[in-house]
Amino acid sequence: MHRSSGKSKNSKTSNAPKQKISYEKKADPAISEYSTSSLNWLRKAEFLMSAPKLNLCVEDTGYEIAFAGRSNAGKSSAINALTNQKQLARASKRPGRTQMINFFSLGNPDQRLVDLPGYGYAAVPEAMKIVWQKELENYLIHRKSLQGLVLLMDIRHPLQHFDVMMLEWAHSRHLFVHVLLTKADKLNRGPASTALQEVKAALKKMKLSFSIQLFSSLNKQGLEELASVMAGRLNYTLDKTIGFDLDSIPEASADDVEEDAFEQDYVLDEASHSEQIVDENANK
Ligand SMILES: Nc1nc2c(ncn2[C@@H]2O[C@H](COP(=O)(O)OP(=O)(O)OP(=O)(O)O)[C@@H](O)[C@H]2O)c(=O)[nH]1
Ligand SMILES: [Mg+2]
């Protein structure tokens, strides 16, 4: 355990009953403020350009995150949902819709989203598949501004051969991956959550500590979580001029804490990752 600050040892609290109060379940206003602000920021997305190959891409500066995954997994739809724009990226029932590397700026050309062509679509002619795959590979290997991938997998068919290759490759290149189990609306809540646990366990078994969430472009499930991850990875910072409203933090009620509670130490319980107030003399 780690003490965050030292308080007076002779305080009245020495005689106070030991108490443990968990704030785990209270929503963190700073987190929701960040995800709301991130969503607003992502709505600034604008189409920059489409490139058929690496040397025709936008300048390789700043930060970008690419949406990768099998054809038809829902990459373009996820970008549209995230940016709240119906046709920013071209989505289609027909697999193989996205055929170039598509760049979108986020209010600043040095912060970008990238919509990649999908892999694994059997109906693409072999020669074309080889060309696409080569260009995709080139992009993934050589793009310096690429911070990481949002890897989309249909929740009903996760961890296909190529997905696993992508995950292992990203790990070897020290790129982050945020996994989306897409089309979560196709399953009921129970089976969706079981699928999530199964993929989490499989990642753990592969020793890959990537983040993962459920997602649906159709009913907008998981948008806030994805927006926060994107914004964090693209170095988006809250507009400092907005200022943080301290009054919005709920105060502990008299039932929760005795009057002298401010004399006690705040420590982070590393086992449960929950912030707790404990009597500083509890271990003496
Ligand atoms: N039910 C449901 N359908 C979705 C969802 N996301 C995408 N789809 C559908 O899945 C199909 C493929 O979506 P796209 O976004 O074009 O998929 P993509 O991964 O960009 O495909 P490629 O460009 O071929 O690689 C479309 O018919 C979408 O409407 C979702 O969350 N729920
Ligand atoms: Mg697409």
Image (cartoon, grey):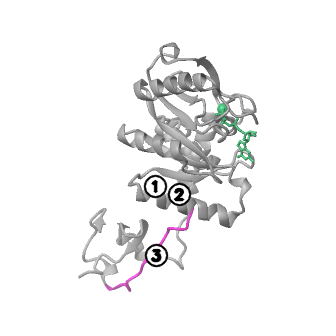
Image marks 1 and 2: residues in contact by CB distance under 8 Å: yes
**For marks 1 and 3 on the same chain, the one whose residue lies earlier in the sequence:** 3
Between the residue at mark 2 and the residue at mark 3, the CA separation in whole angstroms equals 33 Å
Instruction: Please name the amino acid that badge 2 sits on.
Output: Val
Percent from the top left, x then y, of residue 266?
A: 37, 67
> From this viewpoint, which residue is outermost toward the front?
126
Please tell me whether residue 21 belongs to the stretch shown in magenta. Answer: yes
Between the residue at mark 1 and the residue at mark 3, the CA separation in whole angstroms equals 34 Å
Mark whose residue sits in front, 1 or 3: 1
Q: Which residue is mark 3?
A: 21
- Per the image, label 3 sits on a secondary structure element best described as strand
When the figure is inspected, residue 140 is found, relative to residue 250, above or below; the finding is: above
Q: Which residue is mark 1?
A: 203
When the figure is inspected, residue 122 is found, relative to residue 280, above or below; the finding is: above
Instruction: Please name the amino acid that badge 1 sits on.
Output: Leu
Quadrant of the drawing holding the N terminus? bottom left
Q: Who is closer to the viewer here, 40 or 65?
A: 65
Whether residue 243 appears in this view of the structure is: no
Percent from the top left, x then y, of residue 202?
A: 47, 58
Splitting the image into 4 quarters, where does residue 44 fall? top right
State the extent of the magenta-drawn residues as a range: 15-28
- Residue located 47% across and 72% down the image: 22
With 110 as the anchor, is 81 left or right in this view?
right
Q: Which residue is mark 2?
A: 199
Please tell me whether residue 14 belongs to the stretch shown in magenta. Answer: no
Image quadrant of ligand 1? top right
Label ID, residue 146 = none
Image marks 1 and 3: residues in contact by CB distance under 8 Å: no
Instruction: Please name the amino acid that badge 3 sits on.
Output: Ile
- Per the image, label 2 sits on a secondary structure element best described as helix
Q: Who is closer to the viewer here, 280 or 48?
A: 48
